[in-house]
Amino acid sequence: MEPKAGAALLNGLRGRCPACGKGRLFRSFVKVADACGSCGEAFHHHRADDFPAYLVIVVVGHLIVPLTLYVELAWAPSYLLHAAIWLPLILILSIGLLQPIKGAVVALQWHTGMHGFAAARRARRSAPGVEQVGDGRARQAGPEAGLEQHACLQGM
Ligand SMILES: [Zn+2]
């Protein structure tokens, strides 16, 4: 059974597979793995692009700007102190939020079936072991797929 939107988003925020919540969603800091190592769910359909970075800017901006204004109005510290406080905080928050937010974006795309996630899900339900490729054709999953094609070519 597939998780609901909230559970899938939470799995994405934790950097886990939105489908099973066990496998890793990322193969490096912000590089999404091709598939889940636990359940085999394909992730290569995602098209997060720059959206996670925009969301990080929105979130960090809405946290930092009111804080800087409050500190300036309340204590009016020197600009050097402002820089010493806010620049590291912006850096830490931006780097810290990038992977969770990207995970949530990929989980949202997975849950809503965007960019080939829905086609792959339909193909998996109708024929387990067969994955839908981007142009709508079905392709046999697993190492035997290449052998089968090779055998067909030999028969020609
Ligand atoms: Zn999984």
Image (cartoon, helix red, strand yellow):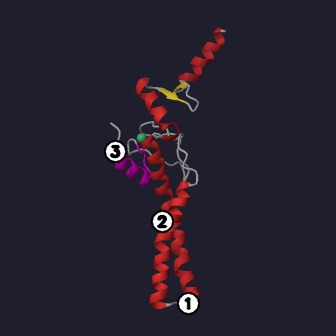
Answer above or below: position of 102 versus 156: below
Q: Is mark 3 within 8 Å of ligand 1?
A: no
Q: Nearer the viewer, residue 151 or 74?
A: 74
**Residue 29, x across and y down, in percent:** 54, 55
Which of pointers 1 and 2 indicates the residue nearer the eye?
2
Residue 60, which numbered label? none
Toward which corner of the image does residue 145 lie, by quadrant?
top right
Residue 59, which numbered label? 2
Which residue does the image show at 64% across and 9% down from the upper left? 155
Which residue does the image show at 52% across and 90% down from the upper left? 77
Which amino acid type is shown beneath numbered disc 1?
Answer: Ser
Q: Which residue is mark 1?
A: 78
Q: Which residue is mark 3?
A: 4
Tell me, yes or no, whether the highlighted magenta stretch contains residue 81: no
| Crowding near the residue tagged with mark 1, few <14, some 14–19, many ≥20 C-alpha atoms within 10 Å | few
Q: Earlier in the sequence, mark 1 or mark 2?
A: 2
**Residue 13, x across and y down, in percent:** 42, 54
**Magenta segment:** 4-18
Q: Is mark 2 within 8 Å of ligand 1?
A: no
| Crowding near the residue tagged with mark 3, few <14, some 14–19, many ≥20 C-alpha atoms within 10 Å | few
Report whether 150 appears left or right of 56.
right
**Residue 17, x across and y down, in percent:** 43, 45
